[in-house]
């Protein structure tokens, strides 16, 4: 594993967004409808390894979701 990233699984917009560990968009506490390290109604935030294998886990679960990288922390 080469490091860590955060993946935001957003069910309402059907989007998976990757974030660097220091991104300001990563929530400090769990939002009401989106979990941290778990899924809630609107999705979840997950800290994963930055290698492609770890990303593919979520891409395989949500194959129809759009994939993108956070514009703020690229």
Image (cartoon, rainbow, N blue to C red):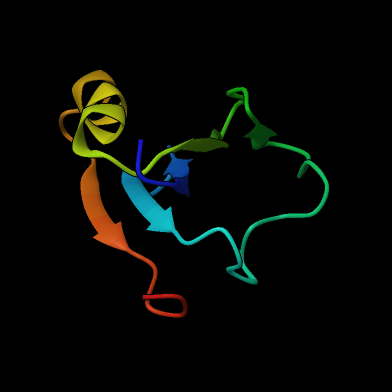
User: What residue is at 48 percent from the left and 62 percent from the top?
Assistant: 20
* Residue that sits furthest to the right in the current view: 29
Q: Position of residue 32 (x, y in %)?
A: 78, 39
Q: Position of residue 49 (x, y in %)?
A: 41, 36
User: What residue is at 44 percent from the left and 44 percent from the top?
Assistant: 7
51 and 40: which one is in front?
51
Q: Position of residue 15 (x, y in %)?
A: 32, 48
Q: How many marks?
A: 0
User: What residue is at 36 percent from the left and 75 percent from the top?
Assistant: 74
* Side (left or right) of 56 relative to 33: left
* Side (left or right) of 8 relative to 2: right
Q: Is residue 19 above or below residue 44?
A: below
Residue 27's quadrant in the figure? bottom right
5 and 68: which one is in front?
5
* Side (left or right) of 38 relative to 63: right
Q: Is residue 2 above or below residue 74?
A: above
Residue 46's quadrant in the figure? top right
Which quarter of the image is occupied by the N terminus? Answer: top left
User: What residue is at 56 percent from the left and 35 percent from the top?
Assistant: 44
Q: Position of residue 39 (x, y in %)?
A: 58, 23
* Residue that sits furthest to the bottom in the current view: 72
Q: Is residue 74 above or below residue 62?
A: below
Residue 64's quadrant in the figure? top left
């Amino acid at each position: 594993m080469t490091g860590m990233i955060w993946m935001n699984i957003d069910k309402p917009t059907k989007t998976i967004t990757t974030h660097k560990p220091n991104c300001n968009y990563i929530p400090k506490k769990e939002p009401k409808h989106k979990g941290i390290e778990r899924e809630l109604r609107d999705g979840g935030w997950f800290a994963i390894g930055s290698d492609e294998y770890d990303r593919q886990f979520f891409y395989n679960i949500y194959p129809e979701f759009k994939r993108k990288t956070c514009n703020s922390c690229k």
